[in-house]
Amino acid sequence: MKRTRISDIRNQEFITAALKATHDHGFHAVTMTEIANQIGATAASINYYFGSKDRLMHETMRHLLDLLREEHIAALSRAEGAKARLRAIIDANFSDTFFTPEHCRFWVQFWSVAPYSETLARLQNINRARVRSHFRHELRHLTPPHTRETIRRLIQSYMDGVWVAVAQGERTLNPAHARQEAYAMIDLVLR
């Protein structure tokens, strides 16, 4: 059994604090002091563990990507058949543990900054390629070749739209409802 290091525990505390503080203050406006105050630490400790606020934000996004990957693996492992696997992708993105107000706000704000930073853009490209690959794999069993990309974009745009609406406070967070709407949309476009 691997021992948990104090630095790993502290890193996780700062990541959780970054999610909360970003939700409360905004990605650009949040300060290291506001993040550190969430856990009774100092801004200097963020520099000690991460080197900078930008590095903390990068690691926070990596943490969210790891959570999403874990949700995908779990949901896909329970699904049998292409349509069930397509729904499993939806389940992962709108899971009760992953689809939270803090995650939505951080996720949407992070991606708005990513095109202007090489390291952040790399994370965005990895995530985009992974989601695209999941959808394409399942859709090739369900749709004719000439409609696959359009259907993939429709589903992905729906998911992104829900995340943006929740992040902006235009929509109440309800993972079960988001999943049901996505299933209905999939049923419509697969007819």
Image (cartoon, helix red, strand yellow):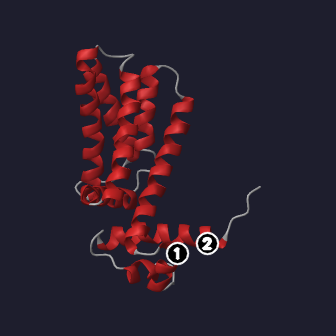
Establish if 166 lies above or below 15.
Answer: above
- Reading the image, the residue beneath label 2 is 7
* Nearer the observer, 81 or 65: 65
Q: Residue 107, can we see it?
A: no
What residue occupies the far front of the structure in this picture? 118
Locate residue 139: give its quadrant: top left
The residue type indicated by label 2 comes to Ser
Please give the name of the residue rendered at 24% of the width and 60% of the height, measured from the top-left corner. 116
What residue occupies the far right of the structure in this picture? 1
* Image coordinates for residue 158, horizontal then vertical, percent: 26, 39
The residue type indicated by label 1 comes to Tyr
Please give the name of the residue rendered at 42% of the width and 35% of the height, measured from the top-left corner. 89
In space, the residues marked 1 and 2 are separated at their CA atoms by 7 Å
> Callout 2: 10 Å neighbours few (<14), some, many (20+)?
few
In the structure shown, which secondary structural element does the residue marked by tag 1 occupy? helix
* Image coordinates for residue 85, horizontal then vertical, percent: 46, 27
Residue 17 appears left or right of 7: left
* Image coordinates for residue 75, horizontal then vertical, percent: 51, 36
Q: Are marks 1 and 2 in contact (CB under 8 Å)?
A: yes
- Reading the image, the residue beneath label 1 is 49
